Image (cartoon, rainbow, N blue to C red):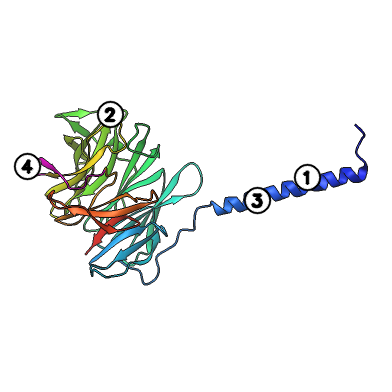
Amino acid sequence: MNALSPRLRLAVVLLAVLLLGGGSLGYVLRARDHAEPRQAAADASFTLAGPRLYYRDAGTGRVAYREPAPAAAPVVGGPTCERFHAAGDTALCLQQLPGLPARADAVVLDRRLRETQRITLPGIPNRARVSASGRMLSWTMFATGDSYATSAFSTRTSILDLNTGYLIKSMEQIPLTMDGARYHAPDVNFWGVTFAKDDNRFYATVATKGRTYLVQGDLATWSATALRENVECPSLSPDNTRIAFKKRVTEGADSPWRLYVLDLRTMTEHPLAEPHSVDDQAAWLDDGTIAYALPAPDGHGTDVWSVPADGTGAPSLTVPGASSPVEVG
């Protein structure tokens, strides 16, 4: 083969530079297209007030609300959150951060939804709860994996006392009692905290050796006791007498959970009228109604549904394209 002339060699080099430059530019543009959207703060007029149903709007990723009037239009203007919860004068917003390894911010907000504290933690946002008074906060992050339906996950659950500023970064070291004896195991995972009205008693899920349990915890003594097997993501009713939870009814299936309610006085349970598998920590809209998120029919995002807490009636679509429902009074 004949050698390339100097002019042809120069043309080849210029073409290569253009192609490489164009490819790099295209990569940069595609990277920008797929970058995380900028996390928005709440609009100045968007505050906690009630009665309103607050939720995460799937279309924008921002917190929105609806007034109780049947024809009330949704108002979107809250902060960008992956998970949201609020009570009293406090809101908790979990924000996923871009990049690897996975990290997220737990953002504490006041009644005007202005940031008062931000804590960066490893993991993927999963659960968020604020006690009725607004004093106690808890959140759960997935440390690895992305689903409770698999065994390849671990969680890190934190508790924050706003009165003292004391932060428990991980509940894993809490003294745990099972079957009347102290329990120790390297695979213990906690998630889904829900607080009682006294800001001391709490309930959560603990998982170990392939099983899940409802635990009752005491913050003052920093202790937890297992009460019952096969209880996940508990949610305490406003009157503090019942717990809504998801119960595993099948193993290794696409729809393993059903919603149940447990009476804490009698320790009896009953299923709710929702026939679909619910992978969510349900929220009590009042003492008689439970809300939760289900995958949308088109496979994109979730919708918020509600169902009577006594097991009667039928599910009703409450807010399409939404998640993280919470009633603020």
Q: Is residue 269 magenta?
A: yes
For residue 16, the mark is 1
Where is the N terminus found, in terms of image quarters? top right
Residue 81 picture location, percent across and down: 39, 56
Marks 2/1: CA–CA distance = 57 Å
Residue type beneath disc 1: Ala
Residue type beneath disc 4: Thr
How would you rate the neighbour count of disc 1 (Cα within 10 Å): few for under 14, some for 14-19, many for 20 or more? few
Q: Is residue 82 magenta?
A: no
Q: From where the camera sits, is residue 182 visible?
A: yes
Q: Considering only order in the chain, which callout, 4 or 3, is on the residue closer to the N terminus?
A: 3
Q: Considering only order in the chain, which callout, 1 or 2, is on the residue closer to the N terminus?
A: 1
**Residue in front for this viewpoint, 153 or 255:** 255
**Residue that badge 2 annotates:** 210
Query: Do tag 2 and tag 4 residues touch (Cβ < 8 Å)?
Result: no
Residue 2 picture location, percent across and down: 92, 34
Q: Considering only order in the chain, which callout, 3 or 2, is on the residue closer to the N terminus?
A: 3
Residue type beneath disc 2: Gly
Main secondary structure of the magenta stretch: loop
**Residue that badge 4 annotates:** 266
Judge left or right: residue 107 versus residue 213. Answer: right
SS assignment at label 4: loop
Displayed quadrant of residue 140: top left
Magenta stretch bounds: 264-276
How would you rate the neighbour count of disc 3 (Cα within 10 Å): few for under 14, some for 14-19, many for 20 or more? few
**Residue that badge 3 annotates:** 26
Residue 277 picture location, percent across and down: 27, 42
Q: Is residue 223 above or below residue 162?
A: above
Marks 1/3: CA–CA distance = 15 Å
